[in-house]
Image: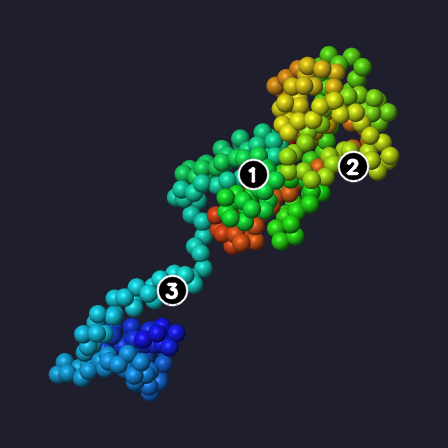
Amino acid sequence: MNLRQFDLNLLIIFEALVSECHVSRAADKVFLSQSAMSHALNRLREQLGDPILVRTEQGLQPTPRALAMAPQVRSALQLLQQSITPTAQFDAANAKRTFTIASTDYFEAVIFPELLSHLLSIAPNIKIEIEMIAEDASQTRLGNGEVDLVVGMDAEQALPSHLISEHWLNESQVCLVANDHASVKSSLSLKQYLKLSHVVFWDVSQVSANSVDTWLEQQNLSRHHMARTVNYMAAARIVEKTNAIMTLPLHMAQLFSQMMKVRIVKPPKGIPAINMTMVHHPLYSEDPAVNWLAKHIHDFSQSIHW
């Protein structure tokens, strides 16, 4: 028989009848009246061309064909039940999942080390792989599940409208100069700022100008780009070795000031803060594991005492 011609609802009836070998008990099992169950049994017999149950001295007994079908029908019903049952909650303590996060330097250097320690304390068997945000990270790789989350993108960056972008962190920006930079004191006016040579961080995912340059352009101003990098660390090392200046998130600057011969300088008034996002794909918005990771990244980041 062609499957399209068969009433699949009758498979539930079939399993109940073969399991119970009793019309009334089978009816109770699937919440039908006895008359409705009798009618369903007649339909089964008609569609399968088999009596299904026959009366014997021991009561109703399944036919050989019904007995042969029963294990396969039960297996199919169990598979269907699993398919329509909501996904279980993520069992962090026992999970052995590998997550992939596409992120900026900021997330990887400032947040990730302590975050990973925190996550491993509650999910000791997970693995997290970090990759830099590439042009396709927010589209192709998120869509096919190769990347679970994109973390740290500037909220001003354009994204496809179908992606889910949530606020992650706001971070003020400061300036960084070499310790021995004689012409720069503890703060900068806008006039002084524009006279200096700048090392500019440029995320490879950016499709628009750096936020500082955009802010300057709105005032018909511009700064001199001495160098442009896709790595905060490289930019900071250039600053350490030259008379250049860079503008970067405060806590990234604090990290570099502990590692290199550089110091933090108060920027000109009005330098925009960075509003960073966490991006995920709607195909996986109900994935308990991805939701677990996103929640812990958000909660951990908010709880840090800078």
Disc 2 crowd, CA 10 A, few/some/many (<14, 14-19, 20+): some
Q: Is residue 275 visible?
A: no
> Are the two marked residues, 2 and 3, in contact with CB atoms closer than 8 angstroms?
no
If you read the primary sequence from the N terminus, does the residue marked by circle 3 or circle 1 appear first? 3
Which amino acid, mark 3? Leu
The quarter in which the C terminus is drawn is top right
If you read the primary sequence from the N terminus, does the residue marked by circle 2 or circle 3 appear first? 3
Residue 9 vs residue 277, the one in the foreground: 9
Tell me the quarter of the picture where residue 232 sits.
top right
Disc 3 crowd, CA 10 A, few/some/many (<14, 14-19, 20+): few
Q: Can residue 274 be seen in this view?
A: yes
Left or right of 262, for residue 78: left
Image label count = 3
Q: Name the residue under label 2.
A: 214
Q: In this view, does 289 lie above or below 248?
A: below
Q: Mark 1 points at which residue?
A: 102
Which amino acid, mark 2? Thr
